[in-house]
Image: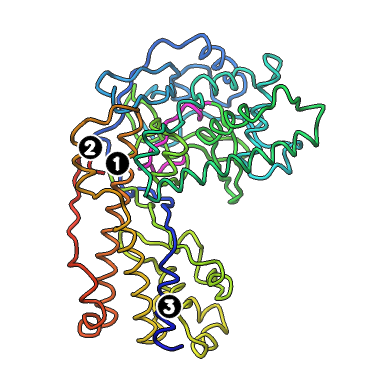
Amino acid sequence: MARDARARVAVAVAAVAVAVAVARAATRARDDAPRARATTPTALDARFLAWADARARWASDDARARGIVVASVEDDDEGKGRGTRRARGAFGAVAGGGETGTRIARDAALERGATTADAGSDEWALAIELMRERAKGGVSAYAPFVESLYEHTPARAVETSKAARARLEGHAAAETLREYERDAEDGWRAARRTFETFPTIFSVREFTRAAFEEALAIVRANSFEARSEDGTRARALVPMAHLLLHDTGSEVPCVKIVDDVFVISVDEHEEGDELSCSHGDYSDAETFARFGVSAFYSAEKNARNKIKFAFPSEIYSVKSLDRCGSVENIAFTDAGATEELMCALRLASANETEWAAVSKSKASVRALRKKPLSEESEIAVYEALFATLTELLNSYPSSDNEDERLLQSRTLQSAPDEERAVTIRLREKRLALSSLNAVQYAGRQQLGGLLFDKHFADVLPSPVNVRQTKNAHDV
């Protein structure tokens, strides 16, 4: 492939949208943990606990036996103006962490059933199952649990405001929110097909789009993909676990399956602390889409935040880029381009001779994670990397400094989630800046200083020193 042809490939590959994917912090910061206090349990809480105690696998109905106190929640006054969190309601009966005394029988949880076997995604199926049980009212075998789900985690509590969405426009996080909206639309179409298949079970009057979207929002915020000892997974709405707070920095999965029983685990805590754990490996943007401000966003970096590099579909299919690894890992991180992204770019820029040589085996393709094809190809690869990152940074409607000043001004009061939206977009910019620095360093190491400067000295800025702080607003 001629030099200008390689350049065209680099430009075509670079001119694509980016999006934020999942991340999780390696360490946790509790210095700005959400403040909440328990109040007297409500009558609903009492009904739920009586129901759960009859189906659980703990030694007694004493709170210390199960390790969890259930109560309603009030945010401290200090938290007002920064986003009222959803009232979860699970507190530590004793100090500890890891597995609690709570064991939930498999049949006490809601999972997809026979009527939703063909309903598409597990979350869509669970939303339909939840709607069905709610429509039964008091005769449902899950009535107290369903009542608790709708009371403690109402869909309106996880909706993102127009003000927050406006703050995210022009950023990859906005596309993440739109992906969730499109998923809800697809889910409703799948739900309608299920309703049409079982007309005697699902009535038009009760099973509306609004009811489905409400149920889906509750499922997204409360269901867990639990792993069993043999590696199989099941997504379910699990009693008691639905009261636990999602922490973006947690390394502790809320639920696992042991001997066909759901076992609940929580983060380290003191007696009386609000309990948290990991609902799943969600990025800041996905956490925002699922939980709004009703989750705990760790002050540490969310280490699985990534900016995905989306290839044009024709290049992806023709060059079989999936052989480089998972599409989710073809991305930028704080540490620069992932090995999967480097492999995919090298494969995409290969000329006919190079393609014939490396496409013979999967091992040859995987070797491109660390090994360049040629000097000419590698220059095209770095052109694509630099073009993507610089175009992304130049496209943002605000700078990182402007975001910092906005957060420090404490003027974001029009909506509870507006401040969180600005924090998320600031983190995205910092990731892109850190990645650009890392890519520049890697390119100089790979190509050598003279060759690197010959091609890129005039088009790249000096490495940017991105300031990182431990302040809760500078994350």
Please provide percent x and percent y for residue 328: 48, 59
Q: Which residue is mark 1?
A: 423
Residue 215: x and y in percent read 59, 29
Left or right of residue 393, residue 104 in this image? right
User: Which badge, 1 or 2, is on the more N-terminal residue?
Assistant: 2
**Residue 247: in magenta span:** yes
Disc on the earlier residue, 3 or 1 = 3
Which is more foreground, mark 3 or mark 2? 3
- In this view, the residue in front, 121 or 228, is 121
Residue type (three-letter) at the residue carrying disc 1 = Thr
Image coordinates of residue 191 in percent, x first then y, are: 69, 37
Estimate the spatial distance between the alpha carbons at disc 1 and disc 2, rounded to whole Å: 8 Å
Q: Which residue is mark 3?
A: 8
Q: Quadrant of residue 258?
A: top right
Label 2 packing within 10 angstroms: few (<14), some (14-19), many (20+): some
Tell me where the magenta segment starts and ends, as one range: 240-253
> Who's the residue at 26% across and 81% down the image?
455
- Mark 1 surroundings: few (<14), some (14-19) or many (≥20) residues within 10 A: many
Magenta span: chief secondary structure:
loop
* Discs 3, 2 touching: Cβ within 8 Å: no
Check contact, mark 1 vs mark 2: CB within 8 A.
Answer: yes
The amino acid pointed to by label 3 is Arg
Of the numbered discs 3 and 2, the one sitting upstream in the chain is 3
The span from disc 3 to disc 1 (Cα, nearest Å) is 36 Å
